Amino acid sequence: MNSTKKKERFVRLAEKRVNNAVKALSLIANLSNTSNYEFNSKQIKSMMNVLDREFKDLKTVFNRKLNKKKTFKLDE
C-alpha cells in the first residue's frame, strides 16, 4: 500500500475513532448525574484508574513509534 493511501486511511480512521472515544467519554460523564445515579468514591476512583491507564498506554504506543528512529548518544 502506498504512503498516500496509508495517510488517508489513518486520517479517516483516526477521526472516526477519536470522535467515538469523545462520545463514549461524554456518555461516561453523564453517569455523574446524581439525579439518575448513585455511586461512591471507590467506584469513581476505579473507573478513573482504568481510563488513565488506558490513555497512558495509548500515549506510550504512539510515542514509541514516533521516537523509534532517534538514537541515543552521550555527549563527550
Image (spheres, rainbow, N blue to C red):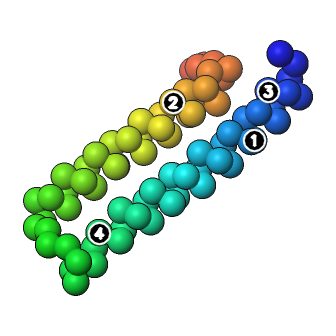
Comes first in the chain, label 4 or label 3: 3
Q: How far is mark 2 from mark 1, CA to CA?
A: 18 Å
Are the residues tagged 4 and 3 within 8 Å (C-beta)?
no
Which quadrant of the figure has residue 32?
Answer: bottom left
| Residue beneath disc 4 | 31
Q: Is mark 2 on a helix, strand or loop?
A: helix
Q: Residue at x 10, y 67 (%)?
A: 40
| Residue beneath disc 1 | 11
| Disc 2 versus disc 3: nearer the observer | 3
Relative to 71, residue 58 above or below: below
Are the residues tagged 4 and 2 within 8 Å (C-beta)?
no
| Residue beneath disc 3 | 6
User: Label 3 sits on what residue type?
Assistant: Lys
| Disc 2 versus disc 1: nearer the observer | 1
The furthest residue to the bottom? 35
Q: How far is mark 1 from mark 4, CA to CA?
A: 31 Å
Q: How far is mark 2 from mark 3, CA to CA?
A: 18 Å
Picture coordinates of residue 27, whole percent (x, y): 41, 64
Picture coordinates of residue 6, whole percent (x, y): 79, 27
The one nearer the camera, 19 or 48, is 19
User: Label 4 sits on what residue type?
Assistant: Leu
Q: Residue at x 52, y 58 (%)?
A: 22
Q: What element carries label 4?
A: loop
Picture coordinates of residue 66, whole percent (x, y): 64, 30
Label 2: how many residues lie within 10 Å, few (<14), some (14-19) or many (20+)?
few
| Residue beneath disc 2 | 61
User: Label 1 sits on what residue type?
Assistant: Val
Q: Can residue 75 be seen here?
A: no
Comes first in the chain, label 2 or label 1: 1
